[in-house]
Amino acid sequence: MRPSVTLFGLARSVYTRIARLALEEKAVPYLLEEVEIFGPGGVPADHLKRHPFGRIPVLLHDAFSVYETHAICRYIDEAFPGPPLQPATPEARARMTQLIGLLDAYAYRPMVWGVFVQRVGIPLRGGVADEEVISKALGQARTALAAIASLAGESPFLAGPTLTLADLHAYPFLRYVALAPEGQAAIAEHPSLTRWLGSLSGRPSVRGTATEYERSAPAGEAS
Ligand SMILES: N[C@@H](CCC(=O)N[C@@H](CS)C(=O)NCC(=O)O)C(=O)O
């Protein structure tokens, strides 16, 4: 039987993975329907009906449709049983939301497009990385990494003692940035982030959503 939840996205997309991590952590059965928005034809017309900005992911639960990843993840957490993914105290909740806002506003573009796509994605397709883009993005990524490390302190998870949506939002970005040698080095400047990345890497949700890029990474890299 088809599950009541469909996630429209791409397995290799960081934002799709964030939503998948929330679904997996809550053990919600779902179907991932791949929508190739980066193809030569651009965003498929039927996807623009789901998402007016042509982005991924979009979640459909029965007749309820929602886009914007943080909204999707909060919905998953609140609509389904399973371990809560949002902390109880106002302070920890604010910290979680602050981290997610920071990741969206200041980390996604430099980490994913500036460092990962340039250093890993483009060469894999036979292209040549733009070193100027990488160098500028790396500076911005370092600022974001320092801010995340400072907010998390020595907590086992980014917003405190338990796993929250902030961890699920950060992992795909940091995992991709770590696939670039200079990204890995920037993360290594923060031992607490290296430990956090390593501990999340062992979770079944993370292993079950590993992307093609991680699977082809040399053993031991950015584990
Ligand atoms: N604000 C959106 C961002 C989603 C997003 O940018 N997704 C990427 C894929 S990881 C995308 O659709 N990129 C297409 C583009 O940049 O045109 C959200 O939170 O869902």
Image (tube, rainbow, N blue to C red):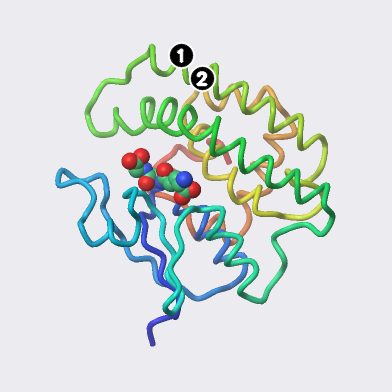
Of 52 and 100, which appears nearest the observer?
A: 52
Name above or below for residue 68 compared with residue 25.
above
Indicate the secondary structure of the residue bearing disc 1: helix
Q: Residues within 10 Å of mark 1 (few under 14, many from 20)?
A: some
Indicate the secondary structure of the residue bearing disc 2: helix
Q: Is residue 220 visible?
A: no
Is label 1 in contact with label 2 (beta carbons under 8 Å)? yes
The residue to which callout 1 is attached is 135
Looking at the picture, how far across and down is residue 51, in whole percent?
A: 35, 56
**Residue plotted at (24% across, 50% down):** 43
Position of 50 compared to 79: left or right?
left
At label 1, which amino acid type do we have?
Ser
Which of the four quarters of the rendered structure image does ligand 1 lie in? top left
Quarter of the image where the N terminus is located:
bottom left
Looking at the picture, how far across and down is residue 148, in whole percent?
A: 69, 33
Name above or below for residue 190 compared with residue 13.
above
Looking at the picture, how far across and down is residue 191, in whole percent?
A: 73, 29
- Choose top left, top right, bottom left or bottom right for residue 197: top right
Res 138 label? 2
Looking at the rendered structure, the number of numbered marks drawn on it comes to: 2
Q: Is residue 56 visible?
A: yes
Quarter of the image where the C terminus is located:
top right
From the Cβ of disc 2, is ligand 1 less than 8 Å away? no
Looking at the picture, how far across and down is residue 183, in whole percent?
A: 53, 25
Position of 171 compared to 5: left or right?
right
At label 2, which amino acid type do we have?
Leu
